[in-house]
Image (spheres, rainbow, N blue to C red):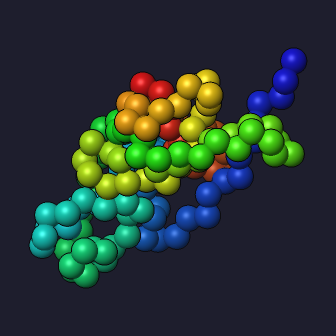
Amino acid sequence: MSEAKKYSAPITNPETAAFWDAASRGKFMIKRCTACGEAHYFPRSICPFCYSDKTVWEEASGEGTIYTYSLMRKSPTGPYAIGYVTLMEGPSVQTNFVDCDLEKLKIGQKVKVVFKPTDGAPLPFFTVA
């Protein structure tokens, strides 16, 4: 019987506290700039597109498609895959892919967010939808 993977708790700060609080409730949050209308991830108070501080929290669908990925077949902890997911709302998210057959991942494949427990807030990862 294999032991479940343990994940380190995220380091939070006042700027990201709302993101991690929502993650604890199973919600994946992004920020949207009300000045230019662009959505962005990782959530931060200043818009990376127009540098406005007029940003608001928005719950994302948690759905997207694989933009690119890399499969590491040999590592001390076993095979794993990392990559970028383009969310339905527009932003791209760097992530690990979990709970799926890593050998069957494909660019353009639909994925969804899943949260993995830590000693703090759960961490968002993506799996095949």
Quarter of the rendering containing residue 79: top right
Q: Is residue 10 left or right of residue 127?
A: right
Residue extending furthest bottom?
51
Q: Position of residue 95 (x, y in %)?
A: 53, 49
- Classify the position of the C terminus by image quarter: top left
In this view, the residue in front, 31 or 49, is 49
Residue placed at 62% from the left, 30% from the top?
Answer: 102
Residue placed at 46% from the left, 62% from the top?
Answer: 17
In the rendered image, the vertical position of residue 114 relative to residue 53, given as above or below: above
Residue extending furthest top?
1
Count of numbered circles in the view:
0
In this view, the residue in front, 58 or 48, is 48
Q: Position of residue 97 (x, y in %)?
A: 57, 38
Q: Is residue 109 left or right of residue 60?
A: right
- Classify the position of the N terminus by image quarter: top right
In the rendered image, the vertical position of residue 10 relative to residue 119, given as above or below: below
Residue 122 can be seen in this image? no
Residue 34 can be seen in this image? yes
Q: Position of residue 116 (x, y in %)?
A: 60, 38
Residue placed at 56% from the left, 25% from the top?
Answer: 104
Residue placed at 59% from the left, 46% from the top?
Answer: 70
Q: Position of residue 28 (x, y in %)?
A: 39, 45
